[in-house]
Amino acid sequence: MPKILILNGPNLNLLGARQPEIYGRETLDDVAAACASLGTSLGLDTDLRQSNHEGQLVDWIQEARGTAAGIVINPGAYTHTSIAILDALNAFDGPVIEVHVSNVHRREDFRRHSYVSLRADGVIAGFGTEGYTLALRRMASLVPGAKPG
Ligand code: DHK
């Protein structure tokens, strides 16, 4: 089965506990379980990872070259700052979907700019943690060998 790497940046390990009025009450483990279950029905293998470190995210994106068919990424605050993550994504050939749990356009101005959007094939924001499964459904349409629903 084609593999989809689902990457999460800083502070997303606190999903469910951190500012639940903004990020909701579901944890990253809940997201991983929902993605694994949907992935099975879409014919996609999912691999969800989280790091608070920019370089670790860059390493995982590089590793995805040749091992993953697509990348779903919520870079957290690195969305707004990281040219290194953008450069790594530009070196990856498959589809990239950017996810934000919150509606970044309804928050502070600095959250409205995303380096990752310069590379992303699509952006999902403001759908809560459901954004990850929406991204996975779109991946099933973009990746050869999947079973779109
Ligand atoms: C998550 C973060 O940690 C923020 O830094 C981003 C994003 C928004 C989210 O909505 O998932 O600005």
Image (cartoon, rainbow, N blue to C red):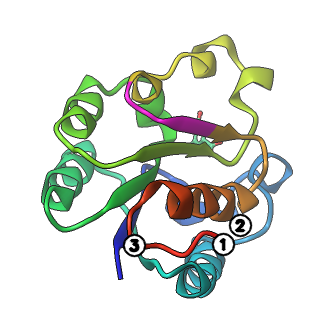
Q: Quadrant of residue 38?
A: bottom right
Which of these two is toward me, 4 or 60? 4
Secondary structure under badge 1? Answer: loop
Q: Quadrant of the C terminus?
A: bottom right
First in sequence: mark 1 vs mark 3: 1
Which residue is denoted by mark 2 in the rendering? Answer: 16
Which is closer to the viewer, label 3 or label 2?
A: 3
- Gap in angstroms between the C-alphas marked 1 and 2: 4 Å
Q: Position of residue 86 (x, y in %)?
A: 29, 30
Label 2 SS: loop
Q: Earlier in the sequence, mark 1 or mark 2?
A: 2
Image quadrant of ligand 1? top right
Q: Amino acid at mark 3?
A: Gly
86 with respect to 72 (left or right): left
Residue tagged by mark 3?
A: 145
Residue located at (58% from left, 15% from top) = 110
Can you give x and y, in whole percent of width and height, for residue 119 in the image?
A: 37, 29
Q: Which residues are magenta?
A: 119-123
* Residue 37 falls in image quadrant: bottom right
